Amino acid sequence: MEVKSRKHTKKMHTKPKSIWEGFFKDKTHGGHRYSSEEFLAMEAREKLFHLDGGKTLLDFGCGSAELLTYYAPEYEQLLGVDFSPSMLGEASKRISERKYNNIDLILADHETLWENLDSDFDRITAAGVVQYLTFEEIDDFLAKASEYLSTDGKIVFFDILDPRLYPLWKLGVFTPNAGLLKALYRIGCDFQTSVTATLKNRPRDISGFTHNPYKIQKIANKNDFEMCYVQSMYYEYKYHAIMFRT
Ligand SMILES: C[S@@+](CC[C@H](N)C(=O)[O-])C[C@H]1O[C@@H](n2cnc3c(N)ncnc32)[C@H](O)[C@@H]1O
């Protein structure tokens, strides 16, 4: 069976528009805690629980479709969007191997995505992506997403970095061998990594920005969505924002 792929025909831009586009341009995996299929399947099951149905789904920042392929059996039609050609290349392979013919892929970013859409979606989701957007970009994304969301639709942002918990995770507080010396060692390593990254004008690592849930909730409310947030099941320092119309 052929994978349907309506990849963007025109080139988005020759130079990366942001440091994140540059960072992801040759990446092939989404940076999940474990890369085993067993773990990805567990993560996807948790996410499907929160997505809670719908027939059509848009996965923004789908990466190499590590979750999207687990969503596929549950939806009639799915669209994966990402600005990284290498990620979409891997996604395409993964989809072909699993013989799914209900997934389309588009090379686009948070701004160019919308001009490629010609139908509404019951679910618009993004897993581990919001940390690469500023609050202003999230606001614009929600305003646009609202235009392409079906009446009873839901928007779910998975795995947003919680600024109250992320520093503790960085210090190793959630590891089995947590302690003061280990924490100091981690601070030292982190400082060194930050300096090197700043000098090379590139991100320190894949993590991105933290976003306070109450700030995301304010933005959701501004765009006429109610929002509830729940703790991520597999990442101690991340949360999911579940948005629906008021
Ligand atoms: C951490 S990975 C997660 C991938 C996938 N959602 C998963 O859970 O396996 C983040 C993905 O978001 C994509 N991404 C980040 N910012 C984006 C943007 N502004 N527009 C489109 N894709 C973006 C990256 O290229 C990358 O594939």
Image (spheres, rainbow, N blue to C red):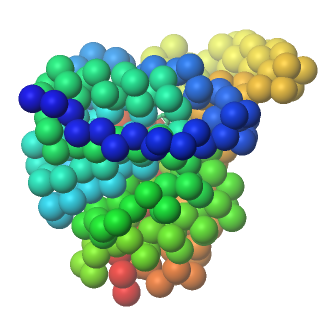
The residue located at (44%, 58%) in the rendering is 116
The residue located at (53%, 74%) in the rendering is 143
Q: Is 72 drawn above or below residue 32 in the view shown?
A: below
Given the current orientation, which residue lies at the most extreme right position? 199
Quadrant of residue 193 in the image? Answer: top right
Residue 196, percent from left and from top:
84, 16
Residue 161, percent from left and from top:
55, 45
Residue 84, percent from left and from top:
52, 32
Q: Is 135 drawn above or below residue 68 in the view shown?
A: below
Q: Is residue 77 left or right of residue 179?
A: left
Q: Is 154 drawn above or below residue 190 in the view shown?
A: below
Q: Is 246 drawn above or below residue 228 in the view shown?
A: below
Residue 232 seen anywhere in this rendered image of the structure: no
Q: Is residue 62 left or right of residue 53?
A: right
Q: Is residue 199 left or right of residue 29?
A: right
Quadrant for the N terminus, please.
Answer: top left
Residue 101 seen anywhere in this rendered image of the structure: yes
The residue located at (54%, 43%) in the rendering is 10
The residue located at (80%, 21%) in the rendering is 197
Q: Who is closer to the viewer here, 149 or 92?
A: 92
Q: Who is closer to the viewer here, 161 or 82?
A: 82
Residue 148, percent from left and from top:
38, 71
Quadrant of residue 7 in the image? Answer: top left
Q: Is residue 106 left or right of residue 37?
A: right
Quadrant of residue 45 in the image? Answer: top left
Quadrant for the C terminus, please.
Answer: bottom left
Given the current orientation, which residue lies at the most extreme front position? 10
